[in-house]
Image (cartoon, rainbow, N blue to C red):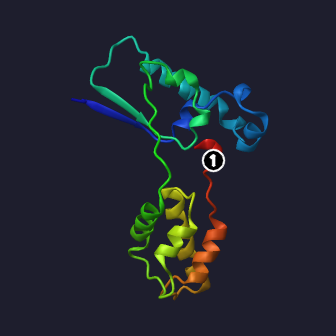
Amino acid sequence: RVRRAVWCVQAVGVGSLPPSSLPRPLFARQRLPPLLPLILGRRTQLLHEMDGVEALTRVVVIAATNRPDLIDPALLRPGRFDRMIYVALPDESDRREILRVHTARMPLAGGVSLHALAEATRGYSGAELAALCREAAQLALSDSLDACEVTERHIRSALEAVPPRTDAASV
């Protein structure tokens, strides 16, 4: 039995590779220098905690990231994060279900088809689909604070504003 589970959200922020090991254009895009000492300090602290003098029993540490290519190899050594489990992007039926959940309390105009939207959002993650739904609702409200429904036009505009950010290289 597991006594305690520790969940690290966005593990890349904790265990990112140092700037010297990142490809130059990628590191330049990320604008991390002001935060770098904090991030590197967290990684060092995490490694010390995981390798600690005192043996931890029945403790599971779970982390998630959408950028596995940036995880520091030191975190992947035996006794630290022993396994990487790939969770694929949602397929069309999964996207339709995610969209159904995120639009359940959102009045959609008669012409809005979740089936067509699920087809149009290939490559979107669940979080991106949630952002797409929020964006469409915000666009409807920006048209009119008295808006009663989200229309196909709002959905199309939201698709332009919220592109999929998961590329084939990071999957």
Image side of residue 155 versus residue 57, left or right: right
The number of numbered discs placed on residues in the rendered structure image is 1
Q: Residue 40's spot in the image, x, y percent?
A: 61, 27
Q: Residue 28's spot in the image, x, y percent?
A: 77, 40
Q: Residue at x 70, y 26 (%)?
A: 21
Is 164 above or below relative to 152? above
- Mark 1: which secondary structure? helix
Q: Quadrant of the N terminus?
A: top left
Q: Residue at x 43, y 77 (%)?
A: 106
Q: Residue at x 78, y 39 (%)?
A: 25
Callout 1 crowding tier (Cα within 10 Å): few <14, some 14–19, many ≥20: few
Image side of residue 97 versus residue 30, left or right: left
Q: Which residue is mark 1?
A: 168
Is 68 above or below relative to 132? above
Relative depth, front residue between 83 and 103: 83
Q: Residue furthest top?
A: 53
